[in-house]
Image (cartoon, rainbow, N blue to C red):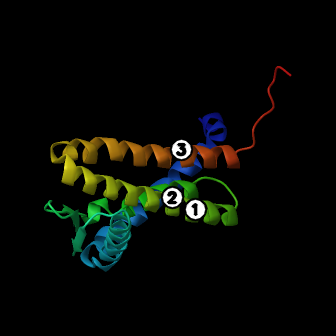
């Protein structure tokens, strides 16, 4: 048993850190942040403002309101707190924090990753607004599957990049 622990110590440390980060986030989110929707609302306003700006600059007659954005001729898309990307920000960041590496490198990588996730989320909302206006029957599928897959694959790809960057590569034993 001791040998098993020694061989897997770094994995166990990572899992313990990840569990603590997850537990801490859940306690913070549901203990305080969930009841104070200001932060979610701030993120949603940011997303809606960017998407509305891009739609207007692209020649679409858009409209927006509290948690709603659309193109004239549609009812508008509701951006809920579940879709604001906050949980994805935490998921991405928590993995990087739990994984070994230099604190400064982690901070830079997390910041750039959050920008990428935010931009992808903006593109997702823009695409969903267009789909809702021009092909509403395919909205649910694209919302539930297509864009969820794209965002999670992007996060997974960034995790892989972090792992490759922070874990020293062993020389090929055949050389």
Whole-number angstrom distance, CA of label 3 to CA of label 1: 13 Å
On screen, residue 74 above or below 53: above
Per the rendering, the mark at residue 157 is 3
Residue 67 visible: no
Is label 2 in a helix, a strand or a loop? helix
* Mark 2 touches mark 1? (CB < 8 Å): yes
Is label 3 in a helix, a strand or a loop? helix
Q: Which residue lies furthest to the top in this view?
A: 174
Residue 33 on image: x %, y %: 32, 74
Question: Which residue matches tag 1?
Answer: 112
Whole-number angstrom distance, CA of label 2 to CA of label 1: 6 Å
Instruction: From the viewer's side, name the closer residue of 114 and 19.
Output: 114
Q: What residue appears at the point 48 percent right and 55 percent down from the top-left corner?
A: 92
Residue 58 on image: x %, y %: 37, 62
3 or 2: mark nearer the eye: 2
The first of marks 3 and 1 along the sequence is 1
The first of marks 3 and 2 along the sequence is 2
Whole-number angstrom distance, CA of label 3 to CA of label 2: 12 Å
Q: How many labels does the image show?
A: 3
Instruction: From the viewer's side, name the closer residue of 154 and 14.
Output: 154
Is label 1 in a helix, a strand or a loop? helix
Q: What residue appears at the point 32 percent right and 42 percent down from the top-left corner?
A: 146
Instruction: From the viewer's side, name the closer residue of 155 and 116.
Output: 116
Question: Which residue matches tag 2?
Answer: 116
Residue 44 visible: yes
Q: What residue appears at the point 30 percent right and 59 percent down from the top-left corner?
A: 83
- Disc 1 crowd, CA 10 A, few/some/many (<14, 14-19, 20+): few
Quadrant that contains the N terminus: top right
Residue 52 on image: x %, y %: 32, 69
- Disc 3 crowd, CA 10 A, few/some/many (<14, 14-19, 20+): few
């Amino acid at each position: 048993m001791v040998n098993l622990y020694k061989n897997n110590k770094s994995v166990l440390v990572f899992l313990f850190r990840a569990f603590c980060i997850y537990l801490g986030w859940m306690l913070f989110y549901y203990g305080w942040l969930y009841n104070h929707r200001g932060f979610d609302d701030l993120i949603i306003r940011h997303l809606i403002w960017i998407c509305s700006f891009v739609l207007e600059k692209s020649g679409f007659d858009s409209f927006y309101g509290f948690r709603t954005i659309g193109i004239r001729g549609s009812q508008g898309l509701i951006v809920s707190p579940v879709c604001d990307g906050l949980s994805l920000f935490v998921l991405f960041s928590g993995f990087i924090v739990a994984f070994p590496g230099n604190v400064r490198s982690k901070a830079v990588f997390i910041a750039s990753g959050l920008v990428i996730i935010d931009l992808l989320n903006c593109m997702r909302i823009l695409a969903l607004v267009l789909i809702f206006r021009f092909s509403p029957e395919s909205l649910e599928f694209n919302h539930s599957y297509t864009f969820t897959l794209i965002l999670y694959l992007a996060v997974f790809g960034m995790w892989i990049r972090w792992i490759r960057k922070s874990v020293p590569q062993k020389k090929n034993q055949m050389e």
